[in-house]
């Protein structure tokens, strides 16, 4: 019979033809969210109408919304901190592969501070548990090192760590944090070191050691700030 061999289909025409999604009234009426955060949420939702779909790169999102990348991350973090979305960072063979933006349709109001947090299928969780969950599927040594030595990792810091892992390497990110700890400094000190290493084309721990040896010998005094031991 024809019905056993042919699969029927249905399609949209018009403005919904290229995809659509839902924007809950709760999100749109949340006075703690900026208009940019609401726009980013609506943009993400438009790609999620049919389940899991490919999501544009950040630079494409910024072009579509006519905002800078820093502005995008700033207002996206409002959605992360309120629990409306979660980012799962996938890794393949130890390297960053892609982000999966999860739009959480189940949230709960946390009494006491009035903030809305995400609720997983297994129950509610506080902000610390949410942040840990955001990186649990991609937790690398760098993320674990940060949490063990600096404290709970925020989505903003997690993004920065991911950025430096991609631009340099995980071992250099960890090394920069070790140097910061020895100097009794915070993570922004480690980022300063990473910026210097990036500018000076430091790619490996051997490069770090070689540059420090040069510094000690006084042959490259102008680069003394590269390695802050």
Image (spheres, grey):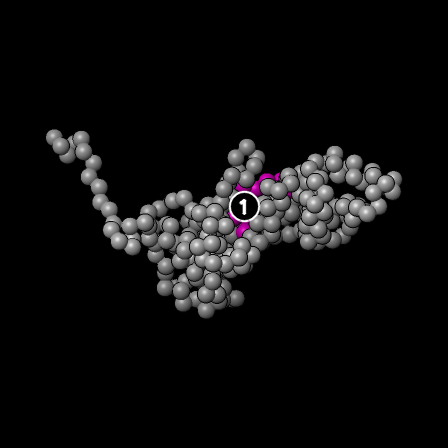
User: Which residue lies most toward the right here?
Assistant: 217
The span picked out in magenta is 131-142
User: Is residue 45 found left or right of 195 in the rendered image?
Assistant: left
User: Is residue 20 found left or right of 147 in the rendered image?
Assistant: left
In the image, 142 versus 21, the foreground residue is 21
Q: Position of residue 4 (x, y in %)?
A: 16, 32
Mark 1: secondary structure: helix
Give yes or no for residue 133 being in the magenta stretch: yes
Q: Position of residue 109 (x, y in %)?
A: 45, 62
Give yes or no for residue 36 being in the magenta stretch: no
Picture layout, residue 112 above or below residue 136:
below
In the image, 81 versus 19, the foreground residue is 19
In the image, 43 versus 190, the foreground residue is 43
Give the residue at x 33% y 47%: 50
Q: Position of residue 179 (x, y in %)?
A: 75, 46
Q: Position of residue 218 (x, y in %)?
A: 87, 42
Q: Main secondary structure of the magenta part?
A: helix
Residue 124 visible from this viewpoint: no
Give the residue at x 69% y 37%: 203
User: Is residue 86 found left or right of 226 in the rendered image?
Assistant: left
Label 1 sits on residue: 135
Residue 162 visible from this viewpoint: yes
The C terminus lies in quadrant? top right
Residue 197 falls in which quadrant of the image?
top right
User: Is residue 90 found left or right of 6 in the rendered image?
Assistant: right
Give the residue at x 13% y 32%: 2
Give the residue at x 76% y 46%: 226
The N terminus lies in quadrant? top left
User: Which residue lies most toward the bottom here?
Assistant: 31
Which class describes the residues within 10 Å of circle 1: few (<14), some (14-19), or many (20+)? many
Picture layout, residue 80 above or below residue 1:
below
């Amino acid at each position: 019979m024809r019905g056993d061999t042919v699969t029927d289909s249905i399609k949209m025409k018009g403005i919904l033809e290229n995809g659509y999604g839902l924007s809950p009234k709760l999100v749109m009426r949340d006075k703690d969210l900026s208009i940019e955060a609401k726009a980013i949420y609506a943009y993400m939702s438009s790609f999620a109408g049919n389940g899991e779909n490919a999501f544009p790169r950040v630079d494409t999102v910024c072009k579509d919304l006519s905002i800078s990348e820093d502005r995008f991350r700033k207002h996206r973090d409002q959605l992360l901190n309120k629990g409306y979305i979660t980012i799962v960072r996938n890794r393949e063979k130890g390297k960053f592969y892609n982000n999966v933006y999860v739009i959480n349709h189940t949230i709960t109001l946390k009494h006491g501070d009035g903030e809305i947090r995400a609720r997983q299928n297994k129950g509610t969780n506080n902000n610390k548990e949410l942040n840990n969950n955001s990186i649990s599927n991609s937790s690398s040594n760098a993320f674990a090192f940060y949490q063990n030595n600096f404290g709970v990792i925020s989505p903003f810091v997690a993004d920065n760590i991911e950025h430096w892992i991609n631009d340099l390497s995980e071992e250099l990110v960890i090394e920069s944090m070790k140097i910061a700890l020895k100097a009794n400094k915070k993570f922004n000190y480690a980022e300063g070191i990473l910026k210097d290493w990036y500018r000076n084309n430091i790619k490996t721990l051997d490069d770090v050691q070689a540059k420090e040896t040069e510094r000690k010998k006084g042959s490259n005094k102008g680069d003394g700030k590269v390695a802050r031991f």
